Image: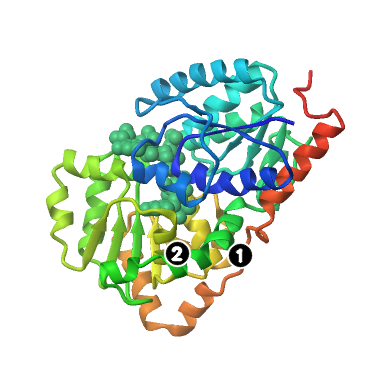
């Protein structure tokens, strides 16, 4: 069997690495196609190295652009590779433009698509990611929703065949790397941080960074933070801060350390030792509850409602008073802190990658891995 993996951004590398590993352990050599949606060393190569992935077979170097430019360019280049390589299945993960391009190019060549992390819905169609998720799910032959709740989202849209709830591969990634991170990373020493003595912040989502108004609200929140904070900054946010003339304000906040994006081991160590996490990232909402760190999500909706229902995550949007109010409560109320930190992980047992490989191999053996007519 020849599985092709199409990926191109930081979270896709992290979340697909356990699946790649599971195929290799079963004697199957995967074909790796990197679209180049992320291309800086610290947004891509660092993860390929740290997670010890085999060499990439095809680098497509798509780069940045408008939604259609990036998706279209990726589709054209992915199609060429798939026509030449003729894999038995194309695996995509998540909701990026790379995912949509990979899924569309593949299904139209009648190569079945397997969607890892299927069924997530924010029910906010103004997000590019929501459009990508919906379309990728409907182009897929085999779907791997991480939870029962996400399976139900698929069912509501009429997708019921070849749907397997397997957990989220982020648990595999965290379990495979947290201990190594604890031992190898010296990030706390490098940044002069005490365990549980800082808030970890990330924000990069288009709705928070692309408008001057919303980015200003984020900056105002950072200026009002009542404790030490660290913000490994996504290049998108850095560029927008400079463009809107807000960078000076951020870099002069005394108790805030802004760094470049970090490698996975450093970042995991920062997460695990954080007092709390404030983020608009999808993967980081998941990692926070897996690692037992209270999470305040800088969004008004989430496609990970399981984290909120479990009690480990609160949606605070860009509301300064609400966000800092929750942070204050965490600082003052030990019982409240304990409840958030001990919220149960809804994303499974860390064997999602193995399940995905087993299921696809089984379907392949039975001759059932094909695009249905
Ligand atoms: C993309 C995904 C988002 C995901 C995020 C993970 C889409 C629509 N969005 O958002 O869902 O959460 O990846 O991090 O696919 N840039 C660099 N260097 C890089 C990559 C990007 O400087 O290596 C800058 C460029 O100015 C680029 C901007 O960041 O225009 C945005 O990059 P892009 O890949 O379009 O979207 P992300 O915000 O990264
Ligand atoms: N991450 C990282 N270094 C950083 C920021 C994030 O390794 O500086 C990891 C993080 O641990 C998580 C993933 O990147 O696994 C999340 O990626 P991102 O927030 O870019 O995307 P999203 O999950 O929102 O799509």
Is residue 126 among what the camera can see?
no
Q: Position of residue 109 (x, y in %)?
A: 65, 16
Q: Position of residue 64 (x, y in %)?
A: 35, 29
Identify the secondary structure beneath mark 1.
Answer: loop
332 is higher (above) or lower (below) than 72: below
93 is higher (above) or lower (below) than 202: above
159 is higher (above) or lower (below) than 308: above
* Mark 2 burial class by Cα count in 10 Å: few <14, some 14-19, many 20+: many
Q: Nearer the viewer, residue 261 or 135?
A: 261
Quadrant position of residue 373: top right
The residue at the point 36 percent across, 25 percent down is 66
Identify the secondary structure beneath mark 2.
Answer: strand
Q: Which mark is residue 295?
A: 2
The residue at the point 33 percent across, 51 percent down is 261
Q: Indicate left or right for 104 with 245 as reference.
A: right
Q: Nearer the viewer, residue 156 or 229?
A: 229
For the N terminus, the image quarter is top right
The residue at the point 64 percent across, 36 percent down is 115
Residue situated furthest right in the rendering: 366
Q: Position of residue 127 (x, y in %)?
A: 44, 37
Is residue 325 among what the camera can see?
yes
Q: How far apart are labels 1 and 2 at the CA level?
A: 13 Å
Which circle's residue, 1 or 2, is located before the other in the chain?
2
Quadrant where ligand 1 appears: top left
* Mark 1 burial class by Cα count in 10 Å: few <14, some 14-19, many 20+: many
- CB at disc 2 and ligand 2 closer than 8 Å: no
Q: Indicate left or right for 307 with 36 as reference.
A: right
Q: Indicate left or right for 115 with 6 as reference.
A: right
Q: Position of residue 69 (x, y in %)?
A: 39, 20
Tag 1 residue: 345
Q: Nearer the viewer, residue 255 or 187?
A: 187
- CB at disc 1 and ligand 2 closer than 8 Å: no
């Amino acid at each position: 069997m020849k599985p092709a993996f199409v990926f191109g951004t930081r979270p896709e590398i992290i979340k697909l690495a356990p699946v790649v590993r599971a195929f290799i352990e079963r004697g199957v050599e995967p074909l790796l196609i990197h679209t180049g949606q992320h291309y800086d060393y610290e947004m891509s190569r660092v993860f390929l190295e740290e997670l010890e992935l085999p060499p990439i077979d095809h680098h497509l170097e798509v780069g940045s652009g408008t939604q259609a430019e990036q998706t279209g360019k990726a589709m054209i280049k992915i199609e060429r590779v798939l026509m030449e390589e003729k894999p038995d299945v194309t695996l995509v993960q998540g909701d990026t433009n790379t995912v949509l391009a990979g899924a569309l190019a593949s299904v139209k060549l009648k190569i079945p698509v397997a969607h890892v992390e299927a069924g997530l819905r924010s029910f906010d169609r103004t997000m590019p990611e929501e459009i990508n998720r919906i379309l990728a799910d409907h182009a897929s032959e085999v779907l791997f929703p991480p939870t029962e709740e996400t399976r139900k989202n698929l069912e509501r849209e009429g997708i019921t065949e070849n749907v397997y709830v397997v957990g989220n591969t982020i648990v595999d990634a965290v379990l495979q790397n947290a201990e190594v991170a604890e031992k190898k990373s010296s990030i706390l020493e490098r940044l002069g941080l005490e365990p549980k003595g800082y808030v970890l912040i990330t924000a990069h989502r288009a709705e928070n960074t692309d408008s001057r108004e919303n980015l200003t609200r984020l900056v105002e929140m950072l200026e009002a933070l009542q404790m030490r904070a660290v913000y490994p900054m996504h290049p998108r946010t850095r560029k927008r801060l400079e463009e809107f003339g807000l960078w000076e304000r951020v870099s002069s906040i005394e108790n805030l350390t802004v760094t470049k994006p970090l490698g996975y081991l450093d970042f995991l160590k920062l997460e695990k030792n954080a007092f709390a996490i404030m983020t608009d990232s999808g993967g980081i909402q998941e990692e926070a509850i897996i690692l037992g760190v209270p999470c305040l999500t800088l969004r008004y909706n989430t496609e990970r409602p399981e984290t909120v229902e479990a009690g480990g995550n609160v949606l605070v949007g860009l509301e300064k008073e609400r966000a800092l109010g929750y942070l204050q409560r965490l600082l003052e109320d030990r019982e409240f802190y304990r409840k958030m930190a001990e919220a149960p992980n809804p994303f499974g047992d860390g064997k999602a990658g193995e399940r995905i490989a087993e299921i696809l191999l089984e379907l392949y053996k039975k001759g059932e891995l094909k695009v249905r007519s």
